[in-house]
Every structure is written in structure tokens, then in C-alpha cells.
Amino acid sequence: MVGVVGKVGNWPSMDLPLADKQHPLPRSGLFVRRNNAFGTKATLGIKDLIEQGVLIDQTQIRFDDFVASNSSGIPTPSVGNAIAVSYGACPAEENFRANENTTHFVEVALRSAKTAEGNTSRQAMPVNFVFVVDTSSSMAGEKLATVKTAIRELYAQLRDTDILGIVSFDTNVRTLLKATPKKDLSEAQLATVVADLRAKGATDINMGVQYGIDEIARYAHVQTDIVNCLYLFSDGDPTSGVRDWITIRRNIAEKTRGELTLSCFGFGTDARMRELEALAGITGGSCALVNDAEDLRLNLAEDLARREHLAAINIQLQIKLDATVTAWHLYGHDLITDAPTRARVERDVAVAKHRARDEYGVESLPDLITDDDGIRIFAPDLAYDETYWVVLEVQAPADWTGFGTATVQYVDALARDNRRHVLQLGVDTSIAPETVFAHAVGLWTSEITFYALDDLYQNDRETASSRLEGHVNTLLQAHSRAPSAQFGDDRVTFMKLISLTKNLGLLRAWSDSGNQAFTEYALNRFGQTRSGFARNRFS
């Protein structure tokens, strides 16, 4: 078992992550993976994006290729199964734990197969894409040019059976391109349509999205074997038509009815990301802040690639701890305490069950997350060659013989059938203690990144630097006790990010705002790679 010695983890202030975890988690509760500016959604090639660096004091800062924590210690699936479910544990000594009462880290991990062996003949379903583009006057220039480039590049990657439609909105709304199969849409025709995207007027998001939903129905209601994806591109608040976000969300929720996924992309520092995130959450879609064209291109490319690589959907976890065991912390997850968030998660589950039935012909098992018993998590879909893990801090008696049980169920996209695993969280483990320890520290690193990112959003560079500096020593001590390339790489990365945060605004690379945006972007991407959800790159 891994032991840890030495005093590390000195927190500069009490509002830091893990510092206020003084109350145990409820034995029964629904948890959601933390979703701020970063969450589960990764990019296709981080190295290609961040090697551009930022000019600081005439020095070109270059970032390493931030890969996710090594998943080699997590078992792979057996032949004929898309997912392997495993468990591990290790002691948690005082210098590496959120709460002083914690005695152990407990990990449950899901790892998908590298490829869909034996399933190569399966034809991916066609995708019905409709873009809803904000063409208000504030989108003029680089923002609208980024959207145009993204549409053209996505078109190039579509198959003949895929469908593309475009709706634009400002003060008014218009259908620029009716939903059309790619085989019937030439590149020249698309270029003419895209060129007609011009910025003017105000912002009627409500009408724009509703028009997009209507347009996606052109094929959604007549073709059952199709994936429906609606994308909203906007940079600000609604200033025309319905202006209340709550009303807009209600209108869109009533109209979607689980038939499509709405993803939102915000442009500019004044984009209402919280509102766009809530809007995307109605259908279980994603939400991202766009800093440049490459960022948007890779987000869209990932969505397009993952449709052919999904290994499991509707993944639900339920952890029931023994009566003698207390949970103190669940890294990277927040307890749901309000009805709207719970309702959103339940809607996401309903969408997943609808997809399982329509795309894979599988009626999902009864939900685990609605059963008011145990720690419950609705996990993101897993594509091939991806890994998802959760780590709990628990307190167990000295004579413990087991922590409890973990149930994991999902729809296996390879077998096109339900799968259910019940794990006894006892002495026998399938994940080595060293791997559990590395993942726990990796998730700790992700939480530090999360809070430092919030500091930067509030223009508090001093606190962001302080948080990062406090964790550098932790990583150094972790590496000395349990040598891992991850700890060394993360420490160097944090040192570079400290340099960036301290020097923001001292030199104009392309602009002070661009400089800050890039640093936030680097933190976003780094946090993703340590968040317990390792996505592949489909390269």
C-alpha cells in the first residue's frame, strides 16, 4: 500500500478546495460532475493548440502535451464487451486528504475497449445537423468569421447521408439553408449560403432556437434512424423578442421533448455562459466558450467523430457504503440540492434512454439515480479507448472488512444490450493501490485548477497564483513518495501557469485580453485531463 510522509498541501486561504470539507457526505444523494468552464469535454489534440504559447517578457512559453492520467493500471474489457468495471483502494494519510478523518481512497473505474472489434460492420447512424447562428451586430468580424469557417470544415467531414441546415437570427429570423442531405448539397451551394451570414440588428435567441428546432424536424420526424444535433452560436444576451432566460428555457424545453441534443457555443468575454450552459443542459448537450476558430473546430470535430465511436451510453453508478463507513469527499462532483438541477439530470437520463431505444434497440434497465439510496452518479457516455473514474474519501474502522458495494449499469453499444455490474468493495481489488493514489492526486490537481480558473474569471490573478503555488509542493512530495511521471509533469505545468498568471497584462502578445483568454484556455484544457474522464482524440 502507498504511504505518504512530509508536510505538504499548505493552503493560502480557507476558501480553497478541500479546506472546508468538514461535514460527511449524505449516505444517499445524487451527485453531478462539476461543470464550469471545463468538465468532461476534451479536445482532439491539446498539444497542437497550446504549443503556440504566449509571449511573456520576450520569452516564448511553450506547453507540454497534457495527456490524461495513465490508465494502464485499469483493467480492459473482455472480448465481446465494450466496458470493464473495476475497483481499487489505498490508505489516505493526513497530507493527501480533504478531511482529517479520512482513512482510505476508494475508486470505481470504467474503461472502454480500444476499438470496436467484432463490430466493424456496424454502420454509424446519419446525423441531422442544424446550425443556429447569431448574426446580430455584435457578432461582426472575427466571431462570425469563426462560425463560417467551422460550418465549412464540418461540411467537409460529413458523409453523404448526413444532413445540414442553417438558421440565422438577429432582430429577425430566417432559414438560410433548409435541412439538406450532403449528397444534394454542393460545396459551391454551401459557400453561397455561408456568405449570406451578415451581422446586423439585435438578438432574438428564443425565436432563433425555435426555428432551428422546427428545421431539424424536417428529417427528425420522418426518419427514425438518425441522430439530431442542434448547435447555437451566440455572443450575448437576448435583446429582441423574448428576453427572459427562464422563459426561453421553458419554451425550448417544451418544444424539444427529448428529440434532439442542443449544444451552445459562447463567443466573447461578455457571453452569458451560465445561461447558455443551462440552455444546453435541457437536452443533455454541451456548452463551451469559444476563444478562437481552432477551439470551435475541434469541439465540432469531436462531436462528429464520437458518434461512430460510442461504447456505452446511459451510464449510472450507485455506491452503497457499509453502515460503519463514512464518506467525506467525492472528487470533482457536487451534491445536487436544488430541484431544477435534479430535474435537468433526470431529463438527461430520459434523453439517454430514448437514444438507447431508438439507436440501439435497447430498453434501458430501471434507473439507479432515481432510487433514493446510496451515492448516485449519472456518468457521461464513453467512446472507445476512454476511461472514467470516481474517487471517494472514506473513513473506515480499523477492523474493516469491506467498504460496501458499487453497482454500475449501462447500455453496451457493442453488444446492443444492457450490462449491470455489482462490485464488492472489499479487500480484493482489481486496481493497484499506486494507481488509486495517482488518480486521487490527479483529481485533487483538477480541483485546484478549477478554483484557479474561477479566480482568473474574476481577474484575481494573485489568488490564482497562490493556489497553484500551494499545490506545486504537494506534487513534489507526491512524486518523491510514489514516483509517477504524472506528478512531475503536472508540477512543471503548474509552474508555467504560475508564470502566465503573474505576467498577465505586463506585455501585449496580441492583446491583454487575448493573453488572459489564452491562460484561461490552458487551465480549461489542463483541468479536463485530470478530471477523471480521459477521452481519446480520434486522431
Image (spheres, rainbow, N blue to C red):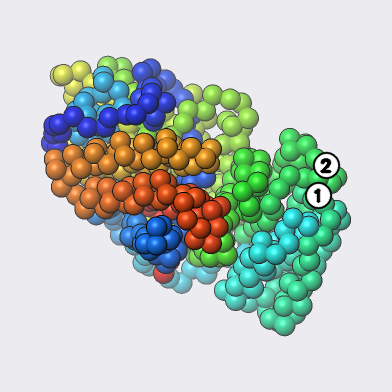
| 2 and 1 marks in contact (CB < 8 Å) | yes
Q: Mark 1 = which residue?
A: 204
- The answer to which quarter of the image holds residue 226 is bottom right
Q: Regarding mark 1 in the picture, which secondary structure is present there?
A: loop
Measure the alpha-carbon separation of dots 2 and 1.
7 Å
At which x and y percent is residue 41?
A: 48, 51
**Pointer 2 or 1: first along the chain:** 1
The residue carrying pointer 1 sits among few (fewer than 14), some (14 to 19) or many (20 or more) residues within 10 Å by Cα, namely many
Three-letter amino acid code at the position of disc 2: Val
At which x and y percent is residue 220?
A: 71, 59
Q: Mark 2 = which residue?
A: 242
Q: Regarding mark 2 in the picture, which secondary structure is present there?
A: loop
The residue carrying pointer 2 sits among few (fewer than 14), some (14 to 19) or many (20 or more) residues within 10 Å by Cα, namely some
User: Closest to the observer: 349 or 356?
Assistant: 349
At which x and y percent is residue 217?
A: 76, 58
Three-letter amino acid code at the position of disc 1: Asp
The residue positioned 66% from the left and 40% from the top of the image is 275
**Where is 523 relative to 246, above or below?**
below
**Quadrant including the C terminus:** bottom left
**Quadrant including the N terminus:** top left
- The answer to whether one can see residue 412 in this image is no
**Where is 203 relative to 245, above or below?**
below
